[in-house]
């Protein structure tokens, strides 16, 4: 039984160490909103989300006030829209109309993002999937709160290289369509492998078809709390270090469990999962890179970084699963560049490059995240980066993702400001050697041998 004393125990974490509940995300199934008419589908979507989520933001604020727990974001995830619009959408513009409806309802209920403008195409694309994917640049250019995602591979099915190649073009087109905002649309677009059905974090959140009609998922975060705990044991061996991380993750997750249960009860919506990812913010002291440096690295990216991150990720999960029976989503350490001041500092110091970040994604959640690259980077190079990251996810049976931003008009040495939780980022160099022949082959990379479990 969770009680208020557990919250009181964490007051210091909240007040001084940047502990927060990063998001309450209501997942909503829109499968019953589908019709053969786009306008009817849009109306159904508007009505259902309004009915279920009208009290979401107020409930989150009430819980935050009553328990003294900062709840940073209130969000919604929905069924992949390529499924919802399949019966009515005949052109990319039809899908853009659904995106605009989602944007309107997100603004009216007060959430900052709504995720699920998505397609799952890990083995192949339907006509509806392809229409939605081709609509993404316009959808993100014409909305403010929509997040889009495309799952292009899985351990079970392999990697859909046709979709990977298409997504290289889509990322580049999105950058061009939002060039007046430093290509901000790409910050709301993620390409995934092994996407989970219950992820509460944007931009990759969607409400999987295996989920209930509506659920509450909560994402907690506490890099600053972990860093503070490790600062108290500067000379400890790895055994003590690991135990400290586990105990800290346990306390962080219990806070999230309390918030999730309260939100579920007050909204009358079943509790889904706790995602206990260490998600940084641009705030000083709220950095995964700082934790790695606290463990003993001069800078994130130094030799030993991947090992330190693997240990951190594993201990966070071990502590979290003791605190909640329903840990899900991504649950690990995020390493976004623009959202983590320590990562930005490491890039500027020359300690961290895209290749090292790729190696780090083998052992953490999620992947190459919020990385700004030159606007002249080709679509095929972007597709090659997506393919590499998808292969890591496929072979390692884990979620990986690419949220990369080719900033039009910017080059290496420039800095791009996204604002808010998205932070700012230095433009990072990209390997300039050509991979177009590889990504243009078409077809599907087969699933690895260990995928055959039946």
Image: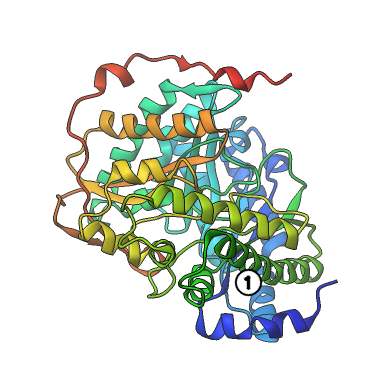
Residue 258: percent from left, percent from top:
74, 71
Q: Quadrant of the N terminus?
A: bottom right
Q: Residues within 10 Å of mark 1 (few under 14, many from 20)?
A: some
Residue 172: percent from left, percent from top:
28, 39
Q: Residue 249 sits in which quadrant?
A: bottom right
Residue under the point 47% across and 75% down: 231
Q: Nearer the viewer, residue 143 or 384?
A: 384
Residue under the point 54% across and 53% down: 313
Q: Which residue is mark 1?
A: 57
Q: Residue furthest right?
A: 1
Residue 122: percent from left, percent from top:
54, 26
Q: Is residue 42 left or right of residue 381?
A: right
Q: Residue 259 sits in which quadrant?
A: bottom right
Q: Is residue 364 left or right of residue 376?
A: right
Q: Is residue 258 visible?
A: yes
Residue under the point 51% across and 74% down: 233
Q: Residue 85 sits in which quadrant?
A: top right
Q: Is residue 353 left or right of residue 446?
A: left
Instruction: Identify the secondary structure beneath mark 1.
Output: helix
């Amino acid at each position: 039984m969770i009680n208020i004393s557990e919250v009181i125990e964490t007051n210091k974490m909240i007040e001084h160490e940047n502990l927060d509940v990063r998001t309450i995300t209501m997942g909503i199934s829109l499968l019953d909103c589908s019709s053969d008419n786009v306008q009817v589908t849009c109306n159904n979507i508007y009505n259902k989300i309004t009915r279920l989520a009208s009290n979401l933001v107020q409930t989150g604020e009430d819980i935050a006030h009553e328990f003294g727990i900062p709840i940073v974001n209130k969000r919604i995830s929905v069924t992949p829209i390529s499924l919802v619009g399949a019966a009515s959408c005949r052109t990319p513009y039809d899908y853009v109309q659904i995106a605009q409806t989602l944007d309107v309802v997100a603004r009216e209920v007060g959430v900052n993002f709504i995720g699920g403008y998505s397609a799952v195409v890990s083995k192949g694309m339907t006509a509806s999937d392809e229409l939605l994917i081709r609509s993404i640049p316009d959808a993100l250019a014409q909305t403010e709160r929509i997040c889009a995602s495309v799952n292009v591979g899985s351990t079970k099915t392999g990697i859909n290289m046709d979709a990977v190649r298409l997504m290289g073009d889509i990322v580049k087109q999105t950058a061009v369509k939002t060039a007046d905002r430093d290509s901000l649309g790409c910050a709301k677009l993620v390409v995934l492998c092994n996407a989970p059905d219950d992820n509460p974090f944007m931009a990759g959140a969607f409400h999987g078809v295996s989920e209930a009609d509506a659920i509450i998922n909560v994402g907690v975060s506490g890099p600053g709390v972990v860093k503070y705990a490790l600062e108290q044991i500067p000379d400890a061996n790895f055994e003590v270090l690991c135990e400290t991380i586990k105990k800290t993750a346990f306390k962080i997750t219990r806070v999230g469990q309390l918030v999730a249960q309260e939100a579920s009860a007050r909204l009358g919506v079943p509790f889904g999962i706790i995602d206990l990812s260490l998600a940084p913010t641009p705030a000083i002291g709220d950095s995964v890179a700082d934790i790695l440096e606290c463990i003993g690295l001069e800078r994130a990216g130094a030799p030993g970084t991947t090992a330190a991150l693997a240990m951190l990720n594993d201990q966070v999960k071990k502590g979290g699963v003791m605190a909640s029976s329903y840990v899900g989503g991504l649950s690990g350490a995020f390493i976004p560049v623009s959202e983590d001041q320590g990562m930005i500092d490491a890039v500027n110091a020359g300690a961290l490059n895209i290749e090292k970040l790729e190696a780090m994604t083998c052992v953490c959640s999620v992947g190459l995240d919020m990385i700004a690259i030159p606007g002249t980077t080709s679509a095929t190079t972007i597709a090659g980066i997506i393919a590499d990251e998808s292969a890591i996810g496929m072979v390692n049976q884990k979620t990986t993702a690419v949220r990369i931003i080719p900033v039009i008009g910017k080059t290496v040495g420039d800095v791009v400001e996204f604002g808010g939780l998205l932070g700012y980022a230095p433009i990072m160099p990209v390997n300039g050697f050509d991979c177009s022949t590889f990504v243009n082959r078409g077809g599907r990379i087969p699933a690895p041998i260990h995928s055959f479990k039946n």
